[in-house]
Structures are given as structure tokens and as C-alpha cells.
Image (cartoon, rainbow, N blue to C red):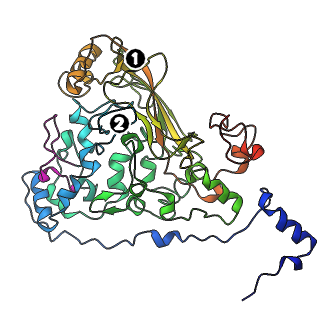
């Protein structure tokens, strides 16, 4: 083995470099990459073919679940304790609140389809259960768990109104097709969340069913399934949505460092960034790379007569939209949690945008990093007397999509959600932030120095709390 030479044998230049190394930020310091990502990717096991195991016939979808749990007795109970089934977080103490609250699609407002209460008939087509049609749904009945939505071949199975199998589904054929979840299973809901392809997230859309490596290096070149990163134990799937949780235990979240080293680069100038910059910031320079994503949704124009429907600009039932491709994220400090989440009945100030979910963290937070987000802006209804956001009934009896009458749809929606509604309404601007973690690019497509550190750089350094570009000022300065 070659021993390192004493510094006095390095010559004059070597001595200068040794002395200057601690402050020579611009000198490349080359180190050996230490991570072995493949060591943390789960082995894919061959799933048991159920063609000759499943018998049937099945009169109801619950009969399918009943047969599943004869061999998998704990499975339904496990699913019933996941957010895929409950659609709400565990009770938690939120900043500024005295009592524990829960957050989730089940009981809170967003700025896409606004809320599910009263709209179960449509929203629950993505629920991992059967028959959720009203507020009295039985979340404690294991036979209400839909095993097929995650495990059946999507060519054999799809869901319809109230989360029941779509008309024409052959339950026996669907049950015989079950296997490990694929991108097709996950994508049916997550790629089309918010009402259509690419609507909600921006980094999740139907281009990920069969992506090239320039769409997503993991799913394209390496053919990852969702469960390679969102690893699962007892049906608890790793990964939480920040918009639906105030505090997330890092052990329950998907992290790049689950597979990669905290310092994965061979160049320490790049490793230096990982203390303050999330991996996603450099490695996901844009989202909606092939399919456009919705960035603006104006509900106030919905219901107007005489306008032509067009998926990307206007629909009578939903209003006006703006979609964009190659969308540049918004950059914010984030420690993985929320500092605020709008809850039903919260007072708003309609004179400025209402932030529905505010990521937690700032330059003074040692656990926070600069993270890319999709900012979705909407104009949605609110009570002009009580100054609260309103949830309309859209689908079902008396819903807006049938009557196109905001006054009655909001009255019905307030009843569904238990809100005190004055009868007077207007529309106000709202913002929601969605973290960008998919569509990871090959290293050749990652951001380069000048993308951030230049006069035309994409980061607003002062908004992030720096006195200026830290390439000039150096380090992680305290806000002045």
C-alpha cells in the first residue's frame, strides 16, 4: 500500500495548496464516491400467479376481498390503517391550535377540485376502498378494502362512481390477474390526481408509464417501479404528501439518501451544496417535460354559457385554466413539514393570496434545504361575510356540474362540510405548493453553476434570505 507523503516532500506548490485548502472554495477537491445505491434497491420477487388460485364467481367486489383475506388474513386490516384508505393524517397538534387536527382529502379544502365532502361519487374513484358514497362510510369494515386497485392488471380493472368497480369489469378476471403493484396501478390515481393527466403535481403524469431516461432516469433507463423507492411493509407505503401532513417523521418519508450518500459526488464543490440544497433542486431542473401541467385554475368562470370546452383552456364545469410544459419550479426553504395548513373554517384575508399549505423552514433552520415546488394558483369561492373558503357540491344531486348555480351548490356544499355559510359569496386567489421529487434527470441534464449563480440565475437569493449570491458572499448567511 502506498503511504501518503509528508507535506514537506510536496514542493512549494504542494505546501501552498495544503495551507490554502480550507479556504480554497473554488479549487476542485476530488474525493471518491462512497455510495452504492443499488445496495438499497429491493430485490424484485416473482409474484405468485393467481390464475389457478382464484375461483369465484363474485357477486360483489366485497366478495373478492373476502377471498383475498382467506390467504392474506392481515392485509385488509393493514390497509385500513393507511392514508390510502383513511384519506387523512393521524391527529396532530398544529401550530397555533389547541386541539389535535387531521389533514387530508377526507376533510380539508384544496385549490384543485376543492373538496370531496358531498362529492364522494366522483372523488372516490381513486379511493382504495368500495362504496364511499356519503359521510356515513364504514371505514372499519375490512370488506370495504379494494385489493384490486393496487394489485390487478389495469387492463382488467378500473374504478367508477363511489369507488366501486367500473361498469363491465369482470371481477374474476381481475382477481386472477393480481400481482405486485406497477406504475400503471399507482399512476391511475397519482398521475391523474386533481381531475386529469398532470393536473396536480407537475412531476407526476402519464408520460411516466413508459418514460425515456430524459423524462425520469429511475423509471426510464433503470425501469424502476414506484415501490422501488416507495418501499412498503405491512401495506404502509413509504412517503407522505406534505400538503396532507403537518409533521412528517423522516423515517416515513422517501429520501434520496435512502439509497444515495449524503455526499455522492466525486467533486467536493458539489458535495458542499448538499448541506443547504436538496438533491431535487439540481437534478429536477423542470417538470411537465412531455405533458403539460395545470398552473392556474379559475373557478369563477365556470358555468358560463356559449363557451367552447377545451381540456387545456376552459371547461364549463370547472372554469378557465393555464397549462405549461417544461415548467420551472418555485424554490423555497423546506424542512419537510408545514408551518401552516388551511383548515375548514379558518378566516382568510381576501385582499391577498390565501396560502393553503405553507412549507416550513427558512435560512435559519439547520434542517431546511432549498427545495423545488410547483406553485398552483387558483381562484375559488369564499364567504364574503364570514371570510372563509367555501366548498361547493359539484357532483351528485343538486351539484354545480348539473345546475351551474353557484348559490345553491355552495349552500349544499356548506351543509356537506359543516360550514356556517352566510349566503354571500365571491372568489379569491389561493396558492398551493407541491414538492417536486419525480422526473429526476440524468446527471448531464442537471443544473450547472450559471443556472443559479449568474445575473440571470433562477434563484431569488434575497427572497431565500441571503444578502446576495452566496457564490460571492460565501456560506449560509443569517438573514439581515
Element type at marker 1? strand
- Which residue bears the numbered disc 1? 427
Residue 225 placement (x, y as % from top left): 40, 61
Magenta residues span: 129-148
Q: Residue furthest front?
A: 98
Q: What percent of the width, then of the height, locates residue 382?
A: 35, 18
Disc number for residue 314: none
Is 141 placed above or below 294 here?
below
Q: Is residue 58 above or below residue 4?
A: above
Is residue 130 within the magenta segment? yes
Let me know if residue 313 appears in the view: no
Q: Residue at x 24, y 72 (%)?
A: 48
> Where does residue 46 sit, x and y in percent of width and height?
31, 73
Mark 2 lies on a secondary structure that is loop
Q: Name the residue nearer the viewer: 60 or 108.
A: 108
77 with respect to 59 (left or right): right
Question: Residue 45 location, x and y as percent?
Answer: 33, 73
Amino acid at each position: 500500500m502506498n503511504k501518503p507523503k509528508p507535506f514537506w516532500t510536496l514542493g512549494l506548490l504542494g505546501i501552498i495548496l495544503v495551507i490554502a485548502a480550507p479556504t480554497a472554495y473554488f479549487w476542485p477537491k476530488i474525493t471518491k464516491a462512497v455510495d452504492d445505491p443499488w445496495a438499497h434497491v429491493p430485490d424484485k420477487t416473482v409474484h405468485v400467479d393467481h390464475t389457478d388460485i382464484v375461483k369465484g364467481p363474485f357477486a360483489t367486489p366485497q366478495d373478492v376481498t373476502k377471498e383475498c383475506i382467506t390467504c392474506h388474513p392481515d392485509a385488509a386490516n393493514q390497509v385500513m390503517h393507511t392514508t390510502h384508505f383513511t384519506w387523512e393524517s393521524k391527529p396532530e397538534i398544529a401550530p397555533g391550535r389547541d386541539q389535535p387536527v387531521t389533514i387530508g382529502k377526507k376533510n380539508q379544502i384544496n385549490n384543485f377540485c376543492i373538496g370531496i365532502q358531498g362529492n364522494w361519487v366522483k372523488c372516490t374513484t381513486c379511493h382504495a376502498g368500495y362504496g364511499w358514497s356519503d359521510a356515513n362510510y364504514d371505514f372499519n369494515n375490512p370488506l370495504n378494502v379494494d385489493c384490486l386497485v393496487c394489485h390487478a392488471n389495469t387492463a382488467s380493472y378500473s374504478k367508477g362512481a363511489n369507488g366501486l368497480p367500473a361498469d363491465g369489469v369482470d371481477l374474476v378476471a381481475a382477481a386472477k390477474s393480481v400481482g405486485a403493484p406497477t406504475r400503471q396501478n399507482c399512476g391511475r390515481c397519482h398521475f391523474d390526481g386533481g381531475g386529469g393527466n398532470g393536473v396536480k403535481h407537475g412531476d407526476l403524469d402519464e408520460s411516466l408509464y413508459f418514460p425515456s431516461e430524459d423524462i425520469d432516469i429511475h423509471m426510464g433507463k433503470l425501469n424502476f417501479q414506484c415501490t422501488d423507492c416507495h418501499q412498503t411493509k405491512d401495506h404502509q407505503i413509504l412517503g407522505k404528501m406534505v400538503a396532507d401532513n403537518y409533521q412528517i417523521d423522516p423515517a416515513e418519508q422517501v429520501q434520496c439518501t435512502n439509497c444515495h450518500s449524503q455526499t455522492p459526488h466525486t467533486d467536493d464543490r458539489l458535495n458542499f451544496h448538499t448541506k443547504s440544497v436538496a438533491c431535487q433542486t439540481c437534478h429536477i431542473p423542470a417538470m411537465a417535460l412531455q405533458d403539460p401541467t395545470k398552473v392556474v385554475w379559475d373557478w369563477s368562470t365556470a358555468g358560463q354559457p356559449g363557451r367552447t370546452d377545451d381540456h387545456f383552456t376552459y371547461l364549463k364545469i370547472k372554469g378557465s385554466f393555464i397549462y405549461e410544459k417544461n415548467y420551472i419550479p418555485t424554490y423555497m426553504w423546506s424542512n419537510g413539514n408545514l408551518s401552516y395548513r388551511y383548515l375548514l373554517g379558518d378566516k382568510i384575508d381576501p385582499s391577498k393570496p390565501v396560502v393553503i399549505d405553507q412549507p416550513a423552514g427558512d435560512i435559519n433552520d439547520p434542517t431546511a434545504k432549498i427545495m423545488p415546488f410547483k406553485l398552483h394558483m387558483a381562484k375559488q369561492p369564499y364567504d364574503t361575510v364570514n371570510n372563509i373558503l367555501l366548498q361547493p357540491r359539484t357532483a351528485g344531486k343538486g351539484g354545480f356540474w348539473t345546475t351551474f348555480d353557484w348559490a345553491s351548490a355552495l349552500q349544499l356544499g356548506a351543509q356537506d362540510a359543516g360550514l356556517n355559510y352566510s349566503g354571500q359569496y365571491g372568489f379569491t386567489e389561493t396558492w398551493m405548493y407541491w414538492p417536486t421529487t419525480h422526473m429526476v434527470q440524468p446527471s448531464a441534464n442537471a443544473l450547472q453553476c450559471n443556472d443559479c449563480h449568474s445575473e440571470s440565475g433562477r434563484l431569488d437569493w434575497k427572497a431565500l434570505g441571503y444578502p446576495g449570491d452566496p457564490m460571492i458572499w460565501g456560506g449560509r448567511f443569517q438573514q439581515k
